[in-house]
Image (cartoon, grey):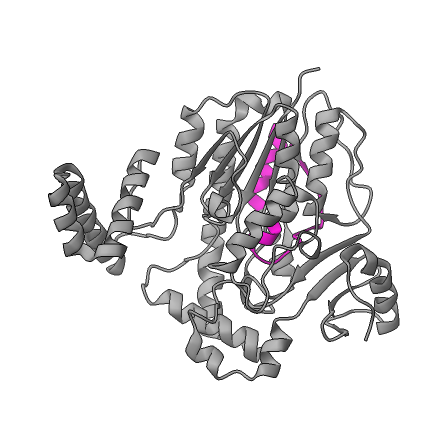
Amino acid sequence: MKKPNIIILVIDTLREDHSQGLEKLRELGFVKYENAIAPAPWTLPSHISLITGLYPSQHGVHEAFGVYPDREMMGLSASQLNKLNHGIIGELMEEDYNTYIFSANPFLSPYFGFNKYTESFIVYYSSLDKVNDIKELNRIRYLDSLVNDKGYIGTAKYLINQGNYGLLFYGIKTFIMRRLRKFAAMIGLLDLTMEKGSTLILKLLNEIKLNEPFFLLINIMEAHGPYVNSEFWSDFAAKAVHKAVFENVIDERVANILRKEYSRHAEYAVNKAIDIVHTLNRYLDNALFIITSDHGELLGDGGLSHGYFLKDGLLRVPLWVKWPNSFRAPKQNRPFISLVEIPSMIKAAVNNDDCEVGSSVAISESFGPPPWLLPNNHKARYKNLSVETLIKKFSHRIRIYTSKCTFTYDESLDSIEDNNCEESVARRIIDVIRPTLNVGPSI
């Protein structure tokens, strides 16, 4: 029997309650599964769970005090992915699958250990540049690296000394166009926040020949921030998220902006996802096509942005699946479904085995503040925090969903919070999952 192609499309940062546009997928034979839970509140640990079938505490790739995404976690992620043979990606390669990664998210790159593939295209680029193809993207990246190292004048002198006048003139043109696009955005003539790489991914998918059988992992970022043109938004939002994490205070100015802007970005991302499905239509008959998100985005409903928080707006994600035509689509037989089930679904489709979908328990884990609140980038803010506060925030917390109740367990402090059931019931549930997650005994 012909092996099915496997496609996973991750609509980064898409909340389940903002994914209504995906209902169009029913017309193409997709099945929607309910109560899908992301295993982590931010990109890297969630994606690694998705391809390995392991929760973050099991695969070990997660934040911690002294382990930050821009430094230590690169090596940690690469090391762990190698030890785990890249999860389902490695298993499929051993079964002669060609593997492709098209990502608009820099976490899904060789820098973080995603280096087992037939072909890979990391297409994330600044919205200041209108990029038409990978060659142009690479030229811009090279110029940016030169400017970061030598400055504008130093880069110009270097290119002149090299006799590379073509790249010099291209750099001058890029510099001018960036300034014009910034000005147009500042006066409201241009929105620099909507397009974050999916148009280029669509172009690549139309041009590249995917050798079957294949595994294709796609990440698009249109539902992800930034949501506002302002150059000051990044620091403004970071201050608000820092306040939400360490003071439990929501800045309503930021929350109102997020509520207003997030919806249209999510809608745009969903439309791009539908376009990608249609672009890959020729493969649908013999493909397991999974569409989901790695996490959502908090809009003042229990927090801001993503990472750290363990709230529904962040953890409940869409999950739509198109099974191969020769495979009977399984019904969901339990109330929840975790993204860690995806490798099992893939194996069932590849081996034409029976597949059970759903779980009585689903969990998500957090180990500290979100990755962009790094101490090295926000030294002044961290300097004002007590050691006790830092220890408390960099703790292992688990959000546990069951049909009986939902609650958060702080393993570091052995405390239960945000629960809708008796503590005795919650502790019995913790005792059941404790061996699975290698969680230590109660204090």
Number of labelled discs?
0
**Residue 188 seen by the camera:** no
Res 142 → quadrant: top left
Query: In percent of the image, x 60 and y 22: which residue is there?
Result: 213
- Residue 406 drawn at (x, y percent): 77, 63
In which quadrant is the N terminus drawn?
top right
Q: Against 251, is 329 above or below?
A: above
User: Outermost residue, top direction?
Assistant: 1
Q: Which residues are magenta?
A: 20-46
- Residue 364 drawn at (x, y percent): 69, 58
Query: In percent of the image, x 70 and y 26: which residue is there?
Result: 350
- Residue 42 covered by magenta stretch: yes
- Residue 93 drawn at (x, y percent): 61, 29
Q: Is residue 406 left or right of residue 424?
A: left
- Residue 329 covered by magenta stretch: no
- Residue 369 drawn at (x, y percent): 56, 68
Q: Is residue 199 left or right of residue 170?
A: right
Res 42 → quadrant: bottom right
Q: Is residue 37 left or right of residue 276?
A: right
In which quadrant is the C terminus drawn?
bottom right
Q: Against 374, is 156 above or below?
A: above
**Residue 212 seen by the camera:** yes
From the viewer's side, name the closer residue of 23 and 181.
181
